Amino acid sequence: MKVITVGNNKGGVGKTMQCFQLVCHLAHLGHRVLAIDLDSQANLSSTLGVNIQRTLIPEWLIGDVGVEEIVCDVEGDHDFYKNVKLIASSRHMANLAKLLILSESEVRKNAGRKERLLKLRLQQIQDQFDYVVIDTPPMLGDELIMSLVASNKILIPTQAQDYSIDGLEELMDTFEIIKETENPGLEFAIIPSMVNPRRKIERQRLEELSQSFNVTPMIRNLVDMQESVALRKPVFMFAKNSKGKTDYTALWDSLGLN
Ligand SMILES: Nc1ncnc2c1ncn2[C@@H]1O[C@H](COP(=O)(O)OP(=O)(O)O)[C@@H](O)[C@H]1O
Ligand SMILES: [Mg+2]
């Protein structure tokens, strides 16, 4: 079972979009995919057709409820959706921090440290899935840290703009700490996201970014992508000449996810 987190402490950079496309792409290839939405805004859940009142993710993490109580099917009439299960989020996800404090001694007994809780829970279901894809909230909080400890790889969508590139340093520092302490095998990929290559300034920023990091092929800022989410139809189902399909095919090829 491979665990892939999509994360960036900045919001609006295309994390949820990436998760949606990746979950559908892997399921279409025939893999058994578990999508986990750790963002209280629950955008991945609703894009996969699931809206719930109250998520029990915090209770699952601390060990009060079993995984069967929080995993659900996704809604959609395409065939590949049968390969997807979802752990959906809701506003209640915001209670995680409080619950972790209240259950501190229990957590220590079970996992040693709270950062290891998600990894522990995923180990218990590792035979049931080929891939786990995790969407995370736009902050360097417990959700993202736990995901980094539990993952083989973090995909980092980044816009080719100043503030995005500045924010990346903070995330990379956290990545290095987790790699040195909890998860030596953790890998990362920086994915230029929502790029407008016609703009000179974006081309320049992209050039700078690729001098500091090895970046993947870019995902452009495209109407295709907005349509894909609105129709809940992944880009691989679009026409052959669709730009969105072209960009994502190149991305998954470069990451060996094909
Ligand atoms: N490549 C893209 N081209 C155009 N719009 C995009 C693209 N990627 C994402 N979007 C749109 O931008 C907004 C933010 O994307 P989202 O994936 O929700 O970001 P995040 O999860 O990082 O907050 C959404 O409205 C989404 O539909
Ligand atoms: Mg999001």
Image (tube, grey):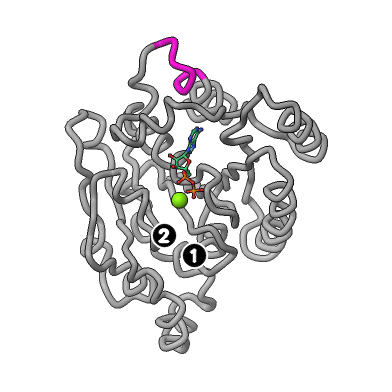
What's the amino acid at mark 2? Leu
Q: Are marks 2 and 1 in contact (CB under 8 Å)?
A: yes
Residue 98: image quadrant is bottom left
Label 2, label 1: how many angstroms apart (C-alpha)? 6 Å
Q: Measured from the top left, where is residue 132 in percent x and y?
A: 41, 47
Q: Measured from the top left, where is residue 110 in percent x and y?
A: 43, 78
Please rate how many residues cluster around mark 2, counting C-alpha atoms within 10 Å: few if below 14, some from 14 to 19, many from 20.
Answer: many
Q: Is residue 130 above or below residue 10?
A: above
Count of numbered circles in the view: 2
What's the amino acid at mark 1? Glu
Residue nearest the observer in this picture, 8 or 110 = 8
Identify the residue shown where x is 40% and y is 82%.
99
Residue 123: image quadrant is bottom left
Identify the residue shown where x is 30% and y is 57%.
88
Residue 253: image quadrant is top right
Indicate the secondary structure of the residue bearing disc 1.
helix
Identify the residue shown where x is 52% and y is 69%.
142
- State the quadrant of the N terminus: top left
Indicate the secondary structure of the residue bearing disc 2.
loop
Residue nearest the observer in this picture, 3 or 59 = 59
Left or right side of 89 for 82? left
Q: Which residues are magenta?
A: 240-246
Q: Measured from the top left, where is residue 66 in percent x and y?
A: 26, 68
Q: Earlier in the sequence, mark 2 or mark 1?
A: 2
Residue nearest the observer in this picture, 161 or 61 = 161
Which residue in the rendered view is the most extreme toward the left? 77
Q: Is residue 146 magenta?
A: no
Q: Is residue 241 magenta?
A: yes
Please rate how many residues cluster around mark 1, counting C-alpha atoms within 10 Å: few if below 14, some from 14 to 19, many from 20.
Answer: many
Which residue in the rendered view is the most extreme toward the top? 241
Check disc 1 and report the residue beneath it.
143
Check disc 2 and report the residue beneath it.
38
